[in-house]
Image (cartoon, rainbow, N blue to C red):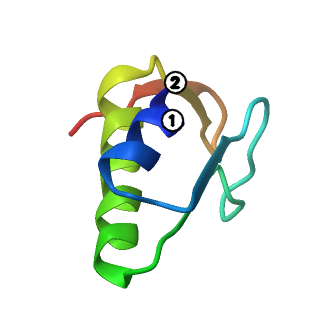
């Protein structure tokens, strides 16, 4: 739904996004967003829009495992 809405709003030819689940080691990709359009500006704006919507609306939590043991639960913020 979010992709369809964004494709229409920004006149994209396509858009895709992926968010990793499970263990993601430091330095590994946890999120990627791909947008394509006839004009670079709309594609870049759509990409930024998607990332911000994901951060704001989806319940994305992360368990950060500390080097010295233990862990912290993090929630994405603005």
Q: Residue furthest top?
A: 59
In-front residue for pair 25/14:
14
Residue holding disc 2: 1
Residue drawn at x 68%, y 59% as measured from the top left? 29
Instruction: Estimate how packed mark 1 is, as few (under 14), some (14 to 19) or many (20 or more) residues with alpha carbons within 10 Å.
Output: few
Residue 11 x/y as whole percent? 38, 58
Residue holding disc 1: 4
In-front residue for pair 78/23:
78
Q: Is residue 51 left or right of residue 52?
A: right
Say whether marks 1 and 2 touch (CB < 8 Å). yes
Please indicate, yes or no, whether residue 19 appears anywhere in the rendered image.
yes
**25 shown above or below 74:** below
Residue drawn at x 29%, y 64% as measured from the top left? 45
Q: Residue furthest left?
A: 78
Residue drawn at x 44%, y 21% as measured from the top left? 58
Quadrant of residue 6 within the rendered picture = top left
Numbered disc 2: secondary structure = loop
Numbered disc 1: secondary structure = helix
Q: Is residue 56 left or right of residue 60?
A: left
Q: Is residue 38 left or right of residue 71?
A: left
Q: Is residue 67 left or right of residue 12?
A: right
Residue 47 x/y as whole percent? 41, 59
Per the rendering, the mark at residue 16 is none
**59 shown above or below 43:** above
Quadrant of residue 13 within the rendered picture = bottom right
Instruction: Estimate how packed mark 2 is, as few (under 14), some (14 to 19) or many (20 or more) residues with alpha carbons within 10 Å.
Output: few
């Amino acid at each position: 739904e979010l992709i369809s809405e964004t494709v229409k709003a920004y006149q994209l030819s396509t858009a895709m996004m992926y968010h990793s689940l499970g263990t993601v080691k430091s330095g590994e990709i946890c999120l990627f967003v791909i947008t394509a359009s006839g004009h670079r500006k709309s594609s870049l704006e759509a990409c930024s829009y998607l990332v911000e919507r994901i951060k704001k609306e989806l319940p994305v939590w992360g368990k950060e495992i500390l080097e010295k043991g233990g862990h912290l639960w993090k929630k994405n913020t603005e």
